[in-house]
Image (cartoon, coloured by chain):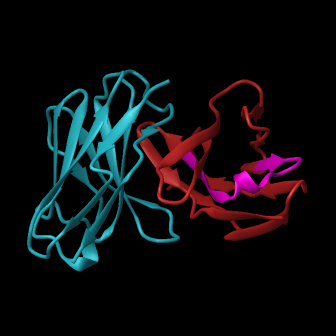
Chain colours: A cyan, B red
Amino acid sequence: GAVVSQHPSRVICKSGTSVKIECRSLDFQATTMFWYRQFPKQSLMLMATSNEGSKATYEQGVEKDKFLINHASLTLSTLTVTSAHPEDSSFYICSALARDQVGAEQYFGPGTRLTVT
Amino acid sequence: AQSVTQLDSQVPVFEEAPVELRCNYSSSVSVYLFWYVQYPNQGLQLLLKYLSGSTLVESINGFEAEFNKSQTSFHLRKPSVHISDTAEYFCAVSYGQNFVFGPGTRLSVLP
């Protein structure tokens, strides 16, 4: 089946620094990837939709200058949390739509736990 | 707009007992339906999905869900749960490229 990886799985960074999270589709091409944020004991909140070769579409209330998304290839999307603050600490999950599978399932990565100290 | 409701935030059940996790959705268009399971500190794993065809879908580990269009429901059931089924379960609907998750149900299986 389709596999999506995320790196790193856990990261601790200091307040004010930036951290990059990678999302890769390992055995398929993904024209569309999604970035979610999950707070403890809560559901997933869609942050943005990332389309290969174009700008990401951000959900209302998500700061695009703070959460930079780059989908440079059909197998890689990155999320960079800039000038991180403790309130950015969260579980970030990406997912990918296999090419030509609009409306079908999303394949999820294992998530990245970000802790900002 | 599409929405997903999971009325039970927590469901405690004893091992080997049956369980039903409820999911209702609201949509004005045709949707696809999914159940995902999330174990602690892990990502989501697809449990089962309904895209078309038979309204009863099954997973390899004994779960099943039935799509009921008239009641706009997609409840998840298992006749006999195991301790290892303890996890968070999310119902989701998709339409086009959009995906909407329910708030989740914490299933706790007690010995």
Residue B43 point in image, percent of width and height: 47, 50
Q: Give coordinates of residue B108: x percent, y percent.
A: 73, 65
Please identify the quadrant where the C terminus of chain A is shown.
bottom left
Where is A102 relative to A36, above or below? Answer: above
Q: Residue at x 51, y 48 (%)?
A: B44
Q: Nearer the viewer, residue A11 or B88?
A: A11
Q: What residue span does the magenta drawing correspond to?
A: B76-93
Q: Is residue B111 above or below residue A25?
A: below
Q: How many numbered marks does the figure carry?
A: 0
Image point 89% across, 47% down: which residue?
Answer: B79
Residue drawn where x is 20% and y is 32% of the image: A52
Which of the two residues, A84 or A44, is positioned nearer the viewer here?
Answer: A84
Whether residue A74 sits left or right of residue B98 in the image: it is: left
Please tell me whether residue A73 is drawn above or below residue A80 in the rendered image: above
Q: Is residue A22 magenta?
A: no
Closer-to-camera residue (B70/B33): B33
Counting from the top left corner in percent of width and height, residue A8 is at 27, 50
Give the camera-side residue of B18 and A13.
Answer: A13
Q: In the rendered view, does B18 fall on the left or right side of A33?
A: right
For residue A50, side relative to residue B17 (left or right) = left
At 56% across and 46% down in the image, what residue appears? B93
Residue A107, image quadrant: top left
Q: Is residue B78 magenta?
A: yes
Q: Where's residue A58, x and y in %?
A: 25, 55
Question: Residue A30 occupies which quadrant of the picture?
Answer: top left
